[in-house]
Image: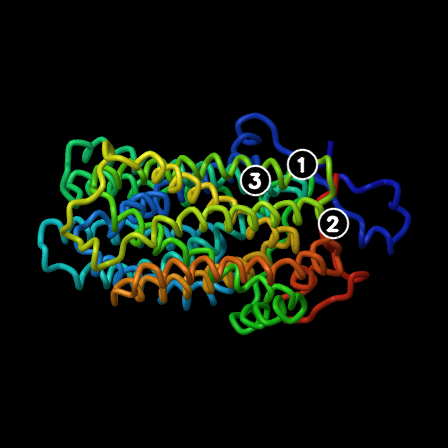
Amino acid sequence: MSEVRENEKYANSEEAASQQPVFFERPTGIKGFYLHPVTQVVMLGLVCFMCPGLFNALNGLGAGGQVDSTTSANSNSALYATFAVSAFFAGSINNRLGARLTLFLGSTGYALYIGSYLAMNIHPHAGAFVIAAGAILGICAGLLWTAQGSLMLSYPTEIQKGRFISIFWTIFNLGAVIGSSVSLAINFGNTGNSVSNSTYIAFLVLTLIGASIPLLMANPHSIVRTDGSKLAAPRHPSWKVEIYGLWVAVRDDPLIIMLFPMFLASNWFYTWQFNGYNAAIFNIQARSLNNFVYWVAQIIGSIFIGFILDTKKIGRRARAFTGWGILFFAVFALHIWAYFYQKDYSRQSMPEDATKIGIHDKGYVAKIWLYFLFGVLDAVWQITVYWIMGAMSNDPAKLAHFTGLYKSIQSAGAAGMWRADAVKTPYMTIFLSTWILMVVGLLFALPMIHLRVKDTTDLADETLARMDDTGHIHSTEEAEFHQPRKD
């Protein structure tokens, strides 16, 4: 059987043939397993398991596992500031260099960042190194997350996107689960407020392993989806044309702008959860257990929302509104609960050297349950945002630009909030800003979902897929676009 099978029904019609999807034979055996979209998404998940996953485990401890949260907050502020700039252009860089190289370059910064905390544990005056490492990681993270988003959203067919995002998110957060379990095991007998060198060394070794995985991944354009379709053929434009593509992506799909408040909120809430709650009122033993539970909750949340967003019982628009409704209810329920804790403490009443809540103290169980549910909410929020973007396009180039914008705006918000924490902004102010921004994000997203999310993605929506290396955009009749089937 030939490698390419044209649909014979339209074989004698030139006009139809130019628009009809082309289906490819999937390889079999070991090669077929290696080139399967699920295998590649699993490998992508392992990269983020080892790198951002362990970064999350470290930050989830509050203050990066240190006693003094100021250095950690300043480092994260520098990280997200450079992340915001890097991610804005990362879609163009990804489309120019290719996703595998972009992913590899992006993963290298995580080892440096974790190593800087080890250096600070050994040399307490190494705070400047931690901040510099954060700034470098921000540049790398912009590249990694843009490549990740483009691949994760372009490998599946339309009906599989929630499932693939869930697979990735589960593996990614297993990194934080395992990292936090290592930290918990090491620090379980530690009733102080900072972690040991062994925690940082274990994290560093795993991160270096993760940085090598992109070198083993397949070329994305050799992957055949499960329905026999391929990703859009790679282009080789100039840098000028690629930057122009960013403008085209927003110009021809301007409703993406209505997701910007939701983008902004998506890392904003970490500052209060990690530093304003976990680091503020718990000792390192409780912080370690809370951290472990938070990332386990992420896995549960990702499986739950992945099932909701991919169910075949209702159309894609109905699934989008369902996801929105779940988020709206959860945001209010959890923040009302959290308010009754936050109103009882402040920076002045809980200084960094205070005796803090331990796992055997009264009221601890209810507080860890709240932290668990915040972990579920985080996963549902992030996956829903990715899924909505995936509902807007199947084109890897366009998705690279969208995810780049997502990470850029997300990181700008995080930079501001980590800086607010570093200058000792009241916990209540940070908490209320988090709650309000999440509500605003959801309110702006609602009309966007109504106007833009359709039950299938049309060729007319895929402007970048119809753009050639010179920047010329072809009509839908001229374009050769291999769309996935919708069933």
Residue type at mark 1 is: Thr
Secondary structure at numbered mark 1:
loop
Which residue bears the numbered disc 2? 456
Circle 2 crowding by C-alpha within 10 Å: few under 14, some 14–19, many from 20: some
Secondary structure at numbered mark 3:
helix
Question: Residue at horizontal 76%, vertical 39%?
Answer: 5
Q: Nearer the viewer, mark 3 or mark 2?
A: 3
Q: In terms of depth relative to the viewer, which is nearer, 39 or 406?
A: 406
Q: Is any atom of residue 230 visible in this view?
A: yes
Secondary structure at numbered mark 2:
loop
Residue 385 position within the rendered picture, expressed as x and y whole percent measured from the top left: 55, 52
Colouring scheme, one of rainbow, by chain, secondary structure, one colour: rainbow
Decide: is 328 above or below 256.
Answer: above
Q: Is residue 93 left or right of residue 365?
A: right
Q: Is residue 274 left or right of residue 143?
A: left
Image quarter where the N terminus lies is top right
Which residue bears the numbered disc 3? 305
| Sequence order check, earlier mark of 3 and 2 | 3
Question: Residue at horizontal 58%, vertical 45%?
Answer: 326
Image quarter where the C terminus lies is top right
Q: In terms of depth relative to the viewer, which is nearer, 447 or 119?
A: 447
Question: Residue at horizontal 37%, vertical 55%?
Answer: 105
Residue 350 position within the rendered picture, expressed as x and y whole percent measured from the top left: 21, 53
Tell me the distance, in whole angstroms, between the alpha carbons under discs 3 and 1. Answer: 10 Å
Q: Is residue 9 left or right of residue 140?
A: right
Residue type at mark 2 is: Thr
| Sequence order check, earlier mark of 2 and 1 | 1
Q: Is any atom of residue 78 visible in this view?
A: no
Which residue bears the numbered disc 1? 311
Tell me the distance, in whole angstroms, between the alpha carbons under discs 3 and 2. Answer: 20 Å
Q: In terms of depth relative to the viewer, which is nearer, 429 or 127?
A: 429
Residue type at mark 3 is: Ile
